Amino acid sequence: MASQWLKARQTKYAAYATTYILIVVAAVVVANVLADRYDKSYDATSNKRYSLSEQTIKIVKGLKQNATITYFDQSTRYREAKDLLDEYAALSPKVKVQYVDPDKDPQAARDAGIRNLGTAVVQIGTRKEDAKSMTEEGVTGAFIRDLKSTTRTVCFVTGSGEYQIDVSDRDGLSRFKELLAKDDYETKSIDLLQNAEVPADCTTLVVAGPKHNYEQPEVDAIKTYVENGGRAFIMLDPPLKGRHFEIADNDALLNLIATWGVTLDKNLIVDPNPLGRLVGVGPEVALVTSYTSQPIVNEMRGTATGFPLSRSLEIKNTDKSAVEKLFDSSGTSQATTNLSAPAVNDPKNKNGPFTIGAAGTYSTGKENAQGRFVVVGGASWVSNYALGLAGNADLALNAVNWLSSDEDLISIRPKAPDDRHITMTQAQLSWVRLTSQFLLPFVVVVAAIGVWLKRR
């Protein structure tokens, strides 16, 4: 009887089922133990939207002293911040995260000056900074403010038709101003016509696309500033001539930049690259995918940038300056000197690639007082309408970081959600509707009838 029972079909099935159940239970137990011991996650989004950025990783892993992130909220709401803050703790053993419920420990909240629930305070050494928001930008911004002991101010020159930081239309720089604020830079406008001297509190000076000529006192102020250890970000549009507008040649400023080893050509780069059509831009936008190893662009490989209405430049070292190329236009680009009626594929056009951006240092002869400058053959790429193109925002911020000697901030910032919309013509929409509403259901019905007939 016992041998028959062991050979019975039901006994075999029960043994198999028991074995499978034990294997599954064991696998689940092992998985949970490993998950509890090793806190790992995988971001499956195409642009790693839910992963900490390279900038954050660089800052946190580079900490020289311990940091504490204290999150103040009701205990039932800790989970809202835990996923993000635990990622910071996982980056470095120097980072500790603690949670405080102001209802249970009001004294701790008062000592920290907490006014609103859901606030994180980052402390490094004796310095404490509140996160402006419970996002990566907010928390990392608090780290940056803790680590930077001095205020950094980016000064934008005004008075000669430059792009303005307080203008929110398509040709303004309000978006650039917002991005700088996220990296904890203060911004202000200065007029070198009224006072031909760069203020002492300017960490970086920005010249963004002047439409009129700079007077000699303005040029002398920029020269004195850089050659005494200042930092300048100079972006000059090509001197286009139209019926209703005209961009000045600005020879005095160009002559100054030439003494530093950068000569800007009086041309316009056009790029008939088919890739431009795929990303929705025309030939007036020079596409860049080729970068050098200079710190500003070293981490931008694989990222495209676009430069509307740009010009080429040539570089060389001088006795006091060392200049490096940053990036070139594509091999399909062309340069035209016909600035009143530029045309693509004109036989007179010069074929690319062309250098559009360069960075250099100026030797002042003083220790730790090196001047720095970045020159780009165009300014509209940082305007509100173009700053969202691919990697333009990263490039602009990286340039300011390098000029301000904030190399630890140079990286690719957190990415916005991918735009996954599908654009179709009316004919394509009609075909999709016909297929989904009529053709596929018809195929299913015919297959079902065929199966029924076969079984009959």
Image: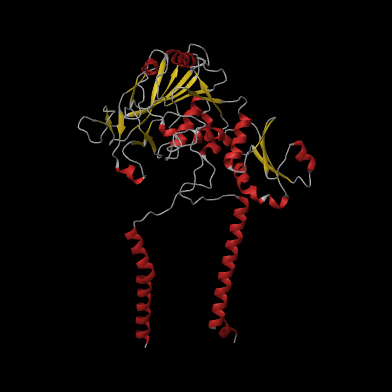
The residue drawn where x is 60% and y is 25% is 151
- Residue positioned most to the top: 365
In the rendered view, tell whether residue 372 sits above or below residue 347: above
Which picture quadrant has residue 442?
bottom left
Number of numbered labels in the structure image: 0
Which picture quadrant has residue 35?
bottom right
Question: Which quarter of the figure is the C terminus placed in?
Answer: bottom left
- Residue positioned most to the left: 347
- Percent across and percent down for residue 100 are 73, 44
Q: Nearer the viewer, residue 18 or 394?
A: 394
- Percent across and percent down for residue 8 are 54, 83
- Percent across and percent down for residue 102 are 76, 45
Which picture quadrant has residue 255?
top left
In the rendered view, tell whether residue 280 sits above or below residue 62: below
The residue drawn where x is 59% and y is 43% is 135
Q: Nearer the viewer, residue 127 or 166?
A: 166
Would residue 417 appear left or right of 257 to someone viewing this image?
right
Question: Which quarter of the figure is the N terminus placed in?
Answer: bottom right
| Residue 64 visible (yes or no) | no
The residue drawn where x is 56% and y is 74% is 17
Would residue 288 appear left or right of 132 to someone viewing this image?
left
Would residue 194 appear left or right of 213 to someone viewing this image?
right
- Percent across and percent down for residue 48 are 49, 47
